[in-house]
Structures are given as C-alpha cells and as structure tokens.
Amino acid sequence: MSILVTGGTGYIGSHTVCELIQNGYEVVVIDNFSNSKRQVLTSIYEITGVKPTFYEGDVADITLLEEIFTKEKIDAVIHFAGFKAVGESVKEPLKYYQNNLESTLHLLAVMQKYHCQKFIFSSSATVYGDPASLPITEDFPLSTTNPYGTTKLMIEQILKDLYQVDPTMNITILRYFNPIGSEKSGRLGEDPNGIPNNLMPYIVRVATGKLPQLNVFGNDYDTKDGTGVRDYIHVVDLAKGHVKALDKLDAGLHIYNLGTGTGYSVLDIVKTFERVNYVSIPYQIVARRPGDIAACYADVTKAKKELGWQAELSIEDMCLDAYHYIEQANKRAD
Ligand code: WQD
C-alpha cells in the first residue's frame, strides 16, 4: 500500500517524503514543480536510497489522478500541493481560489471514487487570524485576513462537511505554525525564487551577502522587544508529525496544532542565527507589514497526548540547519 503525497517536492512535502520512506512507507509523489525543482527527487534518493514513484502534473488534473489511483495502491493521501504566498494571494485572489480549491475538490472526488478514505491536510495557523489570547488551542475561533489563509479555512470546512456525510472517512487537519530549517545533510531546504517574503529565507540571503540587510517589520508591537513573535518549528519535526498522524489515522476528523509551544521574536531569531552561525545580520527597523499580527504560538498539548508527538529540535538547530542548507546549495551551484 502506498501513500500519495501531493506537492511532495516542495519544502515541507519533500521533508515529509523522506520521513515516510525512513519509516517504511511506500511513497508516490505528484508535483508540477510550480514551486520546486526536479532536483529534489534526486536529493530524496541521496538521503533515503529510495526513488519514490513520481508523477509530474497538476493535482487538479482528474485524468492524471485517475491514472495514479488505477496504477498504484493508494492507502492514504497527504495533501501539500497548493500556492502559499500570502502577499501574492492578496494580489491574485482568483489564482489562489482556483488552484487551491479546485485541486483539493478533484482530489477528494477521485479518492471517493477509489474508496481511499485516509486524508491528511496541510493547513496553517493562519486560520486563527489574530488570536485574542495565547497560547492557541485547536478550538480557538477561526478567521482569516488574506485569500491564501481563506483557502485553507475553506478546505477545512469542505473536509468537515465531507466527514458529516461520510463518517467512515479518516481525516486529519494539521495546522502548521512557522516551519523553518532543513534536514541535516543540507540537501533539502527552502530557497524561494525572487525576494523571500518569510523571515528565515530572508535572513539566510543576508547572511550569504545576497541581500544587504534585513528589514524588521516594526518594533512597536506589544511583545518583549516590540518585534513580532512566532512559533518557529523545525521542518523535520513537522515532517515527523505527519508520520505520527499517519500512524494514528483512525476513523474520525482530527485537528492538531504542529508547533513547539514557544514564541520567539524577530530579534531573538536574528541574534540566535548570528550566534550559532558566527555571522552578522545587519538590520533596520521599518514600518509594520500590513496584515501582520503581534504574536502567535501554539498550545501543543493535543498533538502530544493524541499523536504521541512533540517538537524536539531547538531554535539553534533551526538556525544552524537553515544556514547549512544554503551553504550546501551554493556549493552545489558552483
Ligand atoms: C515572521 C515574522 C514578520 C520577514 C507566514 C504566513 C503563514 C505561513 C508562514 C504558510 C513576522 C517578520 C518577516 C521580513 C520581518 N505560511 N518579518 N522581516 O507572516 O508569521 O507567516 O509564513 O503557511 O501562513 O502567514 O511568517 O516569516 O513572513 O514573518 O520582520 O523580511 O518575521 O513581521 O513578525 P508569518 P514570516
């Protein structure tokens, strides 16, 4: 029996594929390389010694999905594929609704046709909006402030409605906080095209001299040093959380926060990155980024109790591994 991983050459998807293989699962990957590179498949082989079965294409392509479910014995699906840039989603909402919703609806329809009932969905802490208190538990009110986050919320609602009519489904929704870092070998990691929107890829570009300095988006928030606080989680811990969710997958609809339960400020990250990597990260304080919230971190009790999972890697590991990846990537490029 195989696990179909959509978006399996992406940042989180590829790390999860490695963890699945290393835990004895047969993996089938579908990806259209819209936000990743074919080289990732080679990296997965170098790390695990296994070449996952691969189908290039779009998850919205029903014919391709039918081919996969006909040829492969798919026991469960982990669905990562989707556009995920908040800023881009504001500029191009239809692109995000079309891509993220259509692909998911077609995938769920084909799963039903082939009686595949196990589904793990890549959701995001962004569905909590600006929380009234902290830490955030899974039963907090849900709201979103951008089309990307709204697609996540809509898909969660689709899954809840689907479960109502088919309670034999095994559905798990995983809400990620802020994934950063890379697996230890430095073969997989996050290096977005263009100027990075997210903090860690931007810091890495400054550390490698590709950008002159970090712009810190505001230091007047109600936090310990005025800069934004987030729950950063090592991407390998996040990947392990998916394996735990798959191992547990039983009838029902389950929702879990995947974070560390600890919040770090922007300046905490800058200082930690500088300390562990022996580099300097020049920065300037600039205006707040529209749509940002002051602070966000998870209550991770439920995942620990029900999945037997908790994050183990430290903020130092995250900063070390993020830099190690880009150093290795630059060596490979030379
Ligand atoms: C983190 C902190 C910024 C860049 C987003 C999405 C979320 C998820 C993760 C997909 C904030 C500050 C950032 C910079 C800065 N993505 N910052 N200078 O906004 O918490 O979450 O990415 O699922 O859905 O919303 O992450 O890394 O962009 O920002 O000061 O150049 O770093 O203000 O406080 P965010 P981020």
Image (cartoon, grey):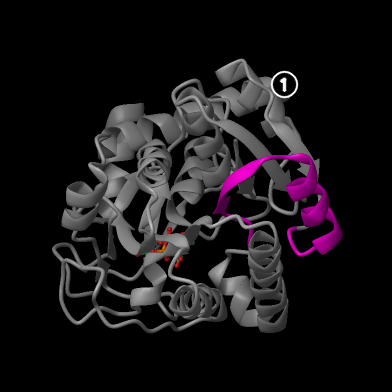
Q: Residue at x 49, y 24 (%)?
A: 24
Percent position of residue 312, x then y: 24, 35
Per the rendered image, the range of residues in magenta is 59-82
Q: Quadrant of residue 64?
A: bottom right
Q: Residue at x 20, y 47 (%)?
A: 304
Q: Residue at x 27, y 32 (%)?
A: 275
Image quarter in which the C terminus is found = top right
Q: Quadrant of residue 247?
A: top left
Percent position of residue 139, x then y: 24, 75
Residue hosting label 1 = 334
Q: Is residue 287 visible?
A: no
Residue type at mark 1 is Asp
In this view, the residue in front, 308 or 33, is: 308
In this view, the residue in front, 270 or 56, is: 56
Percent position of residue 164, x then y: 44, 79
Image quarter in which the N terminus is found = top right
